[in-house]
Image: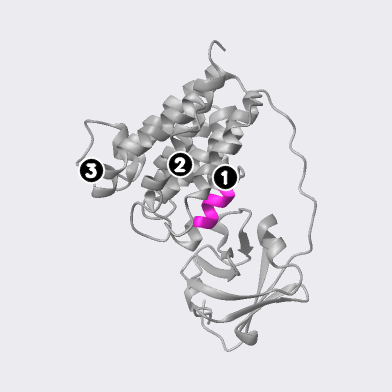
Amino acid sequence: MTRSRSLTLSASSVGGTAASLLDGGRVGRVEGVYSRALNVLFGHRMLCLVRPDVGRSPINVVLDVGEGASLDSVGVSPGMEARAEGGALVIGGGAVTVKLPPPSDAPVPRPRRLRVRRARSNLRLLKREVLTHGNLAGLRGILSASGPARRPTARTAPNPLGQMVRAFEARDLAPISGAARRLIGLGPGLTPAADDLLSGLMMSNLLTSRALGLADGFAERANERVLSEAEGRTTRLSREFLAQASKGSGGEHAEGLLDAVLFGGPEDVGHAARSLFRFGATSGTDTALGILLGAGAALAAGGRGA
């Protein structure tokens, strides 16, 4: 893709949170420019203009461009104004215009029955995938005492992470805030490794709890406690991902992996896990580890004897 003085792009889909930010002529600013994403901040909320390979999520506007396109070469730079107007997002006073699709009603998913024994078996498969095919540089090394030497983030994380997982298994709210304070922001990058893990954990625990029919409200309250500790401890982008995960949204690939674990077969789990592993340096693996721990905690709490 070559840089142009004035470029018009089209979006193939707009997530629900992104659509609300683009409604009403709001004005934002470009915060980050990367090869696969352009991040735009509206007040304290963020949306991401992304390539198709990144996938759909509530905050994503998926652009109709090739998967090899480099979005950092389209003429957008940090600090540019981004204005929603007339069914489009106009960036840099017209340097780039993104045409938005009309709103459409999402199909209502059909209810499916969760088979607890099969889900537990799938979780064992997911653990094997994480240990054998995931990126070794993130937090997932804590699953294996015989694994490679841990990076500083992994050495720092086990105690609060263990507290967090035990609290989710026991449906105990008391330790969650303190553990979250010690985890959030651990690791380098726009989405630190511990944040990716917490996003996977919150999303998967909430959705698995709902699939199990657990009506105690624990997952919702626990996620609120985790999220309440994020302000000022991590990046704006990671804070937005944590906010979405707290409501059960993890993006197309993370939700696809959880769906495979809860309702799919062994091949589905392997394929979905490796698709997620491709994201970021370690983000995909760390999110998958969170899904493993969050879904496992819900099954431990609500699936005993099933």
**Rendering quarter of residue 263:** top right
Callout in the foreground (2, 1): 2
Q: Secondary structure at mark 3?
A: loop
Residue at left offset 41%, top offset 41%: 178
Neighbours of disc 3 within 10 Å: few (<14), some (14-19), many (20+): some
Q: Which mark is residue 8?
A: none
Is residue 241 located in the magenta-colored stretch of the structure?
yes
x and y percentages locating residue 138 in the rendered image: 32, 47
Q: CA distance from mark 1 to mark 3?
A: 28 Å
Q: Secondary structure at mark 2?
A: helix
Give the number of callouts.
3
Residue with the most extreme left position:
149
What residue sits right under mark 1 in the picture?
A: 246
What residue sits right under mark 2 in the picture?
A: 177
Q: Is residue 98 left or right of residue 126?
A: right
Cβ–Cβ under 8 Å for marks 2 and 1: no
What residue sits right under mark 3 in the picture?
A: 150
Label 2 is placed on what type of residue? Ser
Front in this rendered view, residue 279 or 85: 85
Q: Which residues are magenta?
A: 239-246
Q: Is residue 132 visible?
A: no
Q: Is residue 117 above or below residue 258?
A: above
Q: Secondary structure at mark 1?
A: helix
